[in-house]
Amino acid sequence: MAVSEESRKAFVEHIMLQVFDDQYIDRQEEKKILEEGVKKGLGVEEGLAIMRQTAQEKGLGLERDAEERTKDMLEAFANNDGKVDKKEFEDAMAIFKKHSKGKIHADEMKKRMKKMMVENGWKAKEGFFGKWFSAIEG
């Protein structure tokens, strides 16, 4: 179903109002924004596409995209030599921080990234003296 230009503009304005203070859309805000879009006749996929396009055009942070980029990076590192080393993990974390506009605390990012690795079966490369991955809580 095609979205009218008027409905699209109204939805974009709603998105901008929600991110007015911090230029960042976390998962909870994303759900609220999409619920509002559904009330106005948008489908979830349409709403998400508009939200992503708006985020890209306006330089907004979108938690979903930050996590996906980080996951893709960890996957590439894991597929390179079978393991993610500490520097690669830190490089992926820097991307996560950049795309989440610094809105997620470092400890929370580490937990989420560890969970991504465990869920996907990606191994960490830890040295005999440096158990950096094992030390991450979560």
Image (cartoon, helix red, strand yellow):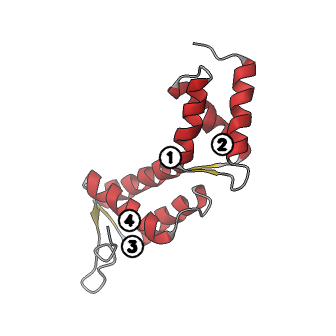
Q: Is residue 25 left or right of residue 27?
A: right
Which residue corresponds to mark 4? 111
Element under disc 2: helix
According to the image, label 1 marks what residue? 64
Instruction: Pick the residue in front: 112 or 39.
Output: 39
Q: Secondary structure at mark 1?
A: helix
Residue 8, numbered circle: none
| Between discs 4 and 3, the one toward the N terminus | 3
Residue type, numbered disc 1: Arg
- For label 2, the crowd category at 10 Å Cα-Cα, with few meaning under 14, some 14 to 19 and many 20 or more, is many
Q: CA distance from mark 1 to mark 3?
A: 24 Å
Dot 3 falls on a residue whose secondary structure is helix
Q: Mark 4 and mark 1: span between their CA atoms?
A: 16 Å
Q: Nearer the viewer, mark 2 or mark 3?
A: 2
Q: Residue furthest bottom?
A: 129
Amino acid at pointer 3: Lys
Q: Residue at x 48, y 65 (%)?
A: 93
Q: Which residue is mark 3?
A: 86
